[in-house]
Amino acid sequence: MDDLLEIYKRIAYLRNNGIKMKEIADRVQMAASVMSSLYSSVLPTYIGEVKKGVDEEAALDYALSQVNNVSKKRLLSHLAEMKEQLFELEPAQNENKKKNPFLEMMSKEARTSAQESYNYSGIYISYSLSSSADALKVEPYLICPAENNEYVRVVHMSAYHTTHTGIGLFNNHMNAYILFNERETPELALFTIYLQLPMYDFPQMLKGICLCLDYNRNPIARRILFIKHSDSTSMEDFLSLKGEIIPHELLREELLPYYDYTCQPGDCIRTCTVPTPSLDDKDLEREKKMLNI
């Protein structure tokens, strides 16, 4: 009897996507009046009775008794064929159907960014606070247009020597956004970077904020610096570099300004999940105390 529920849901889907009841009835070789009774009365009544705990057979008998033009014998004998025909029927694609304006804007910005990225193409070394220790995290990034010039390709080499590929959006020479997935597909864990672009061409330094998830999937926001390493967009040159985490006491003198900018107490914002059956102002206080431990 599960087929009856699937048939009802399929008819509802087809009608909600513009297919008329007569077309649905013709598809399964059934009179339109019979199909209308089945959809508007028999199936809803049957489903409602089953949800009340009534036996499926009794529920169907009761639902059919509410109309006088649907035969139980014919319905059950053609059930499998009806289901097959309904699932083969697909609504026509409406080219004028309203699309998601945000996704359209993102696609447009991606193409525009590919044309603007010459200002920022190359290999960068990023500096930010390590999430596991009082140390400077150093990681290479490659920024360049994709081969088809449809978007800006960004490749990241983590401090643990894993690579991630994402996209960059560079708009109006003021802001840039870098997005990629930090976990293995199909798991989604977005790593996003917001960069402020200086008001001149071919900058050697970019600064901004990165937002990612810690090992417990709590968000972390922190300062980040991008320092231009070279104008090369060669993947071979990029892969020759390695990321690392450098403890404060081992920092070379030229790296101290980067540490001072990115690794002070006010340069990282953390949250954590407080184990609680509810969430109130007391839990907020507990969270702040836990973060200070």
Image: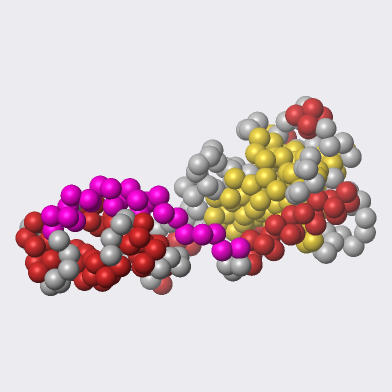
Q: Main secondary structure of the magenta part?
A: helix
Direction from residue 191 to residue 173 in the image, left or right:
right
The residue at 8%/62% (across/down) is 61
- Tell me where residue 147 appears, x and y as whole percent: 79, 40
Q: What colour scheme has been applied to the protein in the rendered image?
A: secondary structure
**Residue furthest right in the image:** 201
The residue at 82%/29% (across/down) is 237
Is residue 154 or residue 207 the one in the foreground?
154
- Tell me where residue 215 appears, x and y as whole percent: 50, 44
Tally of numbered tags: 0
The residue at 64%/65% (across/down) is 102
- Is residue 88 on the magenta stretch? yes
- Tell me where residue 104 appears, x and y as whole percent: 67, 62
Is residue 193 or residue 254 the one in the foreground?
193
Direction from residue 267 to residue 205 in the image, left or right:
right
Whether residue 143 is situated above or below residue 89 in the rendered picture: above
- Is residue 231 on the magenta stretch? no
Whether residue 18 is situated above or below residue 206 in the rendered picture: below
Whether residue 30 is situated above or below residue 182 in the rendered picture: below
The residue at 25%/57% (across/down) is 5
The reply to whether residue 89 is visible in this rendering is yes
Is residue 174 or residue 111 the one in the foreground?
111
- Tell me where residue 134 appears, x and y as whole percent: 63, 44
The reply to whether residue 290 is visible in this rendering is no
Whether residue 170 is situated above or below residue 242 in the rendered picture: below
Q: Which residues are magenta?
A: 72-95
Direction from residue 256 to residue 292 in the image, left or right:
left
Is residue 204 or residue 286 the one in the foreground?
204
Residue 58 figure quarter = bottom left
